[in-house]
Amino acid sequence: MWRSLALVTALVIGSLPLASKADTISIGQLYGFGFDGVVTLPTPLTNGGGTVPITNPLSVPIPNAPWTFTLPTAGTLTVLDLFQSFDQFEIFDNDISIGTTSVPIAGGTCDSDFICARSDPSYSLGVFNLVAGPHSITGFQTRGIEGAGGLLVSLAPVPLPGALPLFATGVAALGFLSWRRRRKQVYIA
């Protein structure tokens, strides 16, 4: 009986598809990715964008897709076209589309400067909100020509607690009342 159970277990495990290798990316690190969509679209985003480094801030080549990471809190994923402003992307998280980047306008002149391109509406940009937990990001070029882009995962800023302004108002009111009371006191010598 145990041999039969072991044989069935081995057959089941052996028939499972092999998991594709996913590389972890770091939160707060700018990565360069590439794509080659001259002939056919959509074209998968790859690790080919590291051949020409993205500047301001300096990027590192992205590992093989899918790009995985785990967020301890909510965060954002920024995807930006660079060099020539012709390209648009559709982004997926755990094989579910989370949206597309904006429509590009030809004529952007920022080249490899991430900060410049992020503020130039000519370049296709997408900032996607992500929840805390594990993520597996992939994407496709859906418009444009071959090129490179930048990808950045950031943690969302911690919001100010809603009670903090109320607390500050209360402390200020107590301070004012204390000052007023001291002012009204009459000193007899």
Image (cartoon, helix red, strand yellow):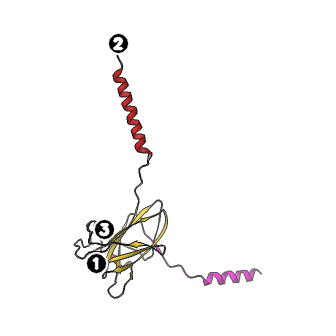
Nearest the camera: 152 or 38? 38
Q: Secondary structure at mark 3?
A: loop
Mark 2 or mark 3, whichever is nearer to me:
2
Q: Residue furthest right?
A: 1
Q: Disc 2 designates what residue? A: 188
Specify which label sits upstream in the sequence, 2 or 1: 1
Mark 2 burial class by Cα count in 10 Å: few <14, some 14-19, many 20+: few
The quarter of the rendered structure image containing the C terminus is: top left
Q: Type of residue at label 1?
A: Phe
User: What separation in Å lies between label 2 and label 1 (alpha carbons)?
Assistant: 82 Å
Q: Disc 3 designates what residue? A: 58
Specify which label sits upstream in the sequence, 2 or 3: 3
Residue 84 sits in quarter: bottom left
Q: Is 8 contained in the magenta span?
A: yes
Pinpoint residue 26: horizontal percent, then vertical percent. 42, 66
**What's the mark number on residue 184?**
none
Specify which label sits upstream in the sequence, 1 or 3: 3
